[in-house]
C-alpha cells in the first residue's frame, strides 16, 4: 500500500481531512451509540475541532475531537476514531474506510498498546495526544507484541479494550477538561492506602488542548482475571435461589452482599484516611454544605416531576397510575429529601459516586472488586469530585439491589412475593455489614443516632430514585416502574 502525502499528514492536513470525512460517519453512529449521552438534545451540527493521525502498518489511525452543537445549551465534545486504508495509486488517504466508531476497528487495539508502551506524543492542529505508561505496565504486557485484544463496552458510556488476562483500557467517549476522578481515586487507593479491592492504574492518555485544561482520554488498568460482573452474578444467584427453591443459594447470596457491605465500608474508610491531601481530606458537613445538598435534591425533584408530567399521557394505564401517585406526593418527597439535614455534624468524603452492582466484580475467590470511580456520567467533573455523604454510595447500592429484584421478577414472575421478601433481607445484610465496618472510623461518616441515620438514608435513596426516573424516561421507559415503585414506597 502507498503512504500518504506529506501534506495530508501535517496536523492541518489531517484536521481538514477529518472535517470532511468524519461528521457524516459520526452522525450515522450517534442514534444507536450507548456512549452518546446527549440523545435527549436536538443535534444542530458536528465539527471536528482537532485530529491526530498516526501511520500504522497499511493504514492510518486517526483520533479526533468532535464538538457537537445543539439547539439549546452548551456544546459537548466526544472522542471518535477512524482506521483508514491508504490509496497506493494516489499516495493519499482514501475516504472509503472512515468509521464513526473506529475504536472497534481492526488494528486499533494493537496501535493503542504500542503507543502507550512508547509514551508517544502525537501532535494535532490544536493540541496533542499524550500517552503515559505508569509503573507496572511493561511488567504486565511486555515490551512488544499484543496480547489477544477484545473490544467491548460499546453498550456503555465508555469503550473498553481487554488485552488477554492482563490489561483493560477504558477509552472515554465524552471528553471533559479537568482531573478524571476514576484516575485520581484509583491512584490514591493503590499508592496511598491499603485498600486492594479496586483496579490499579497502569497508564493514562491525555489530550492536551491548546485552549483548555488537559482531558483524560483513556486509562489502562490491571485486568481482574476470572471476575464476574456483579450485576450478572447477582441475577444468576437469584435464579438459583428462587428457581430451584434453594435456601442454601439464597443464604450464600445474602452472605456475599454482606461482604460487599464490608468492602464498601473499607473503601470509604480508605477514601477518608488522608487528612493532609486537600483533594481527599474529610470535611465537616456544615449548615452551608447541607443546605446546598438539600437544594440540589429539591432541584432534582422538580426536574423529575417535569419529566414525569411529559411522560404521563403516553404511559400505559398501570404505569400512568404509578406516575399519578408519585406526582401527587411531590410535597411528601420534598419533606423526605430534607432529611439530609439529619447528617449535620458528620463528615463529607470522596465517594465512588455511581455505585451499583454493575460497578463491581465478583471474583473467583468469592470476594469483590469495585470498578469505575468516574461518577455519574451526566454530571460535570467538578461535581463528581465534590466531597459528599458516604450515604450517596450506600443508597446507590441499595437501589441496585432493588433493580436486581425487578430483573429477577421479570425472569420468574411466580417468585415475586419471595423476591420482595429477599430484597428486605438483602438490604439488611448489606447495610448491617456496612455499619459494622464504619463503626469507630476516624471521621464520623454517619449520624450516630439511629433515627437520624434512617432519615438521612431515606432522603438519599429518594434522591437516587428520582435520578433513576429521569434516566429511565430518557433511555429505558420499560424500566420506569422500578424507581416509581421505590418512590411510592417512600411516601406510602
Image (cartoon, helix red, strand yellow):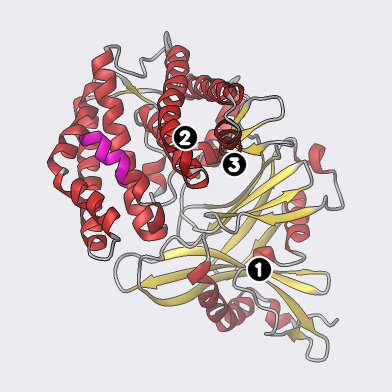
In the image, what residue occupies the spot 64% across and 65% down? 123
Q: In front: mark 1 or mark 3?
A: 3
In the image, what residue occupies the spot 47% across and 16% down? 433
Provide the residue designation for mark 1. 102
Q: In the image, residue 216 lies at what x, y percent?
A: 55, 51
Q: Secondary structure at mark 2?
A: loop
User: Label 1: how many residues lie within 10 Å, few (<14), some (14-19) or many (20+)?
Assistant: many
Q: In the image, residue 306 lies at what x, y percent?
A: 21, 56
In the image, what residue occupies the spot 53% across and 78% down? 23
Q: Secondary structure at mark 1?
A: helix
Q: In front: mark 2 or mark 3?
A: 3
Q: In the image, residue 447 lies at what x, y percent?
A: 29, 16
What secondary structure prevails in the magenta region? Answer: helix
The stretch of residues the image draws in magenta is 484-492
Q: In this rendering, would 223 be left or right of 71?
A: right
Image quadrant containing the C terminus: top left
Q: Report which quarter residue 462 is drawn in.
A: top left
Give the alpha-carbon distance from disc 1 to disc 3, as whole Å.
28 Å
Up the image or down, 426 lies above or below 167; here it is above
Provide the residue designation for mark 3. 232
Provide the residue designation for mark 2. 352
Earlier-in-chain disc, 2 versus 3: 3
Q: Are marks 2 and 3 in contact (CB under 8 Å)?
A: no
Residue 162 located within the stretch drawn in magenta: no
Residue 192 in view (yes/no): yes
Q: Secondary structure at mark 3?
A: helix
Amino acid at each position: 500500500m502507498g503512504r500518504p502525502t506529506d501534506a495530508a499528514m501535517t496536523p492541518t492536513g489531517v484536521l481538514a481531512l477529518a472535517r470532511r470525512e468524519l461528521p457524516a460517519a459520526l452522525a450515522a453512529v450517534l442514534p444507536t451509540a450507548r456512549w452518546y449521552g446527549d440523545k435527549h438534545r436536538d443535534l444542530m451540527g458536528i465539527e471536528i475541532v482537532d485530529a491526530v493521525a498516526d501511520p500504522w502498518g497499511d493504514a492510518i489511525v486517526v483520533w479526533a475531537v468532535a464538538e457537537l452543537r445543539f439547539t439549546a445549551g452548551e456544546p459537548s465534545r466526544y472522542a471518535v476514531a477512524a482506521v483508514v486504508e491508504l490509496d497506493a495509486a494516489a499516495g493519499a488517504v482514501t475516504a472509503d474506510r472512515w468509521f464513526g466508531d473506529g475504536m472497534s476497528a481492526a488494528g486499533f487495539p494493537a496501535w493503542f498498546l504500542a503507543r502507550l508502551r512508547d509514551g508517544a506524543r502525537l501532535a494535532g492542529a490544536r493540541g496533542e495526544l499524550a500517552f503515559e505508561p505508569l509503573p507496572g505496565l511493561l511488567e504486565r504486557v511486555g515490551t512488544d507484541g499484543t496480547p489477544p485484544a477484545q473490544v467491548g463496552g460499546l453498550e456503555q458510556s465508555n469503550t473498553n479494550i481487554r488485552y488477554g488476562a492482563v490489561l483493560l483500557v477504558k477509552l472515554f467517549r465524552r471528553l471533559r477538561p479537568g482531573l478524571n476522578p476514576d484516575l485520581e481515586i484509583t491512584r490514591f487507593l493503590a499508592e496511598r492506602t491499603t485498600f486492594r479491592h479496586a483496579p490499579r492504574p497502569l497508564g493514562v492518555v491525555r489530550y492536551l488542548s491548546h485552549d483548555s485544561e488537559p482531558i483524560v482520554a483513556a486509562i489502562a488498568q490491571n485486568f481482574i482475571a476470572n471476575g464476574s460482573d456483579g450485576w450478572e452474578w447477582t441475577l444468576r444467584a437469584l435464579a438459583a435461589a428462587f428457581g430451584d427453591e434453594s435456601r442454601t443459594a439464597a443464604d450464600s447470596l445474602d452472605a456475599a452482599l454482606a461482604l460487599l457491605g464490608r468492602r464498601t465500608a473499607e473503601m470509604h474508610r480508605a477514601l477518608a484516611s488522608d487528612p493532609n491531601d486537600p483533594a481527599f481530606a474529610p470535611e465537616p458537613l456544615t449548615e452551608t454544605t447541607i443546605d446546598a445538598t438539600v437544594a440540589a435534591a429539591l432541584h432534582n425533584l422538580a426536574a423529575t416531576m417535569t419529566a414525569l408530567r411529559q411522560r404521563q399521557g403516553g404511559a400505559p394505564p398501570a404505569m400512568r397510575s404509578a406516575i399519578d401517585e408519585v406526582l401527587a406526593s411531590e410535597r411528601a418527597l420534598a419533606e423526605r429529601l430534607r432529611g439530609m439535614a439529619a447528617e449535620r455534624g458528620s463528615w463529607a468524603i470522596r465517594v465512588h459516586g455511581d455505585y451499583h452492582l454493575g460497578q463491581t466484580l465478583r471474583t473467583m475467590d468469592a470476594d469483590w472488586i469495585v470498578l469505575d470511580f468516574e461518577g455519574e456520567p451526566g454530571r460535570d467533573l467538578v461535581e463528581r469530585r465534590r466531597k459528599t455523604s458516604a450515604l450517596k454510595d450506600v443508597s446507590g447500592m441499595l437501589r441496585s439491589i432493588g433493580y436486581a429484584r425487578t430483573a429477577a421478577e421479570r425472569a420468574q414472575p411466580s417468585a415475586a412475593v419471595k423476591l420482595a421478601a429477599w430484597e428486605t433481607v438483602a438490604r439488611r445484610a448489606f447495610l448491617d455489614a456496612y455499619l459494622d465496618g464504619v463503626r469507630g472510623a476516624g471521621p464520623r461518616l454517619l449520624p450516630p443516632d439511629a433515627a437520624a441515620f434512617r432519615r438521612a438514608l431515606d432522603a438519599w435513596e429518594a434522591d437516587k430514585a428520582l435520578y433513576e426516573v429521569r434516566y429511565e424516561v430518557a433511555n429505558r421507559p420499560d424500566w420506569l416502574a422500578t424507581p416509581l415503585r421505590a418512590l411510592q414506597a417512600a411516601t406510602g
